[in-house]
Image: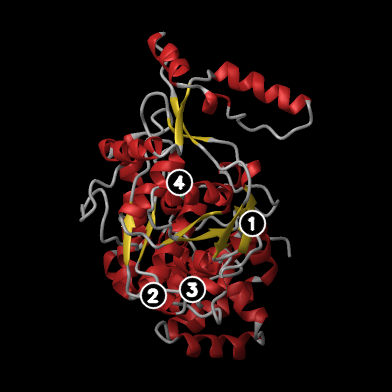
Amino acid sequence: MMIHKSRFAPSPTGNLHLGNARTALFSWLAVRKVGGAFVLRLEDTDQERSLGHYGDRVLEDLRWLGLDWDEGPDCGGPFAPYRQMERLSLYGEFFDRLQAAGNAYPCFCTAEDLEKERQMQLAAGRPPRYSGRCRELGNAGRSRFLEAGCRPTLRFAVPRSGNLRVQDLVWGERNFSLADTGDFVIRRSDGTPAFLFANAVDDALMGIDLVLRGEDHLSNTPRQILVLEALALPAPQYGHLPLLVAQDGQPLSKRHGAASLRDLRARGYLPAALCNYLGHLGHHYPDEEWREMAGLVQDFSLGGISRSPARFDWSQLHYWQSRAIREMDEGALQDWLSPHLTGVVPPALLTGFLGAIRENILLPPDAVEWAGRCFGFPFPEPEVQAALAAVGSAFWEAAEAAFVTCPEDFPGWTRKLAAVSGQRGRNLYLPLRLALTGVEHGPELAALVPLLGPQRVRERLHAAAAHSSNSPA
Ligand code: GLU
């Protein structure tokens, strides 16, 4: 199969949803893998639902994710414009051609007429579809409606019998019965093209030969192919991606806390983590290794797309987020976190601090929390105070005495403390960790102690000792 050009064609009706971000990523990976071109097109003809600023946001979000495009609303291209509302005049010729060939006809049915028809069909136990009533209107009938000021839609005349076979890249061959495909609207009564029509025609005009999109569009495909065949325009290869669902099997929504790319970005998820995560979501890579963009491209395969619904899973996303943090170089780590740490971490200690905590954080607030633990005044919770008290003051005195002899030698300090106190392993490190950080888990103490500096270390050992001497034990 030859592929040269793919596209992402969002409708700017809201923030970019994670499912759509995955569709964009897969389309981009598939075409970049073969060195092909990627197009971004905004499908904004649904004027009631489209909002201009969402278009700009989609571009911004995709760029943030790491995608680029060769043609699009911002950079133009040989088939400009790339916003469908700016392409309205282009569609007229195709409507005319369909009508002249008898493949399309004006329909004067009102919304009420259509609803009545639908109810009757349902009551008779038949699947609702447009009866084709206006197809039979002669010229005289049409003129009557037009003279009465009615503004028709334009419907595509679907052959009354036969089947259409569609070869889908994910689902294989699908067979659609034409008798079950009602005549559908291709131009709204306000003159704007319906989604099905503009989407198919633009793909052909823009030379798109690969379309990956959500499974919810599978049933549109035969209708789009009919339109393209009637216009003698080439159809792309379609592949429909199983929907992205939440753990409960429901479509992923705000309720699940992960609806939009923008939300995740605001919370501090990294684009590289999302690309690795989404790349593995409903697509099989040969292994679970970390991949830079080039690796994601190289190892992507259309055959690796799964047919089962993809389930969003926070723990998987967190796994890739921590991998992404480990892969960041020092500069990138600083760019990411330093805006959150200004005024909390002494500038001279920033690099060391970030190096110490990088394996213990997922999101910027985690870094802020560690900065507070290290450089703020620790206020251990009552359970921590109780745990410190239980250790007994002799241990803390020994700890401080050993520390002052070698404040810059962590292994030396703990060796001495072990010898004097008789404690080792967990019994030695856990109390120290609690006294120095206020929590049981965290970065290597050997890395934290030099950051805290001798004064803070001693203050905290003192504070621990103070709890012990106050305790009845
Ligand atoms: N504008 C459509 C959507 O956002 C595009 C579908 C397609 O990719 O063909 O769902």
Which image quadrant: the C terminus? bottom right
Residue type at the position of mark 1: Asn
- Asked whether mark 4 and ligand 1 are closer than 8 Å, the reply comes as no
Q: Amino acid at mark 4?
A: Val
Q: Position of residue 335 (x, y in %)?
A: 30, 64
The mark closer to the camera, 2 or 3, is 2
Residue 81, disc: none
Q: Which residue is mark 4?
A: 227
Please tell me which residue lies in front, 148 or 244. 148
Residue 154 occupies quadrant: top left
Is there CB contact under 8 Å for labels 4 and 1? no
Whether residue 80 is visible to the viewer of this picture, yes or no, is: yes
The response on whether ligand 1 sits within 8 Å of label 2 is no
For marks 3 and 4, the one nearer the N-term is: 4
Residue that numbered label 3 is attached to:
323
Who comes first in sequence, dot 1 or dot 3?
1
Mark 1 secondary-structure assignment: strand
User: Quick one: 34 or 284, which is closer to the camera?
Assistant: 34
Query: Could you tell me which secondary element the residue under label 3 belongs to?
Result: helix
Residue position for label 2: 33
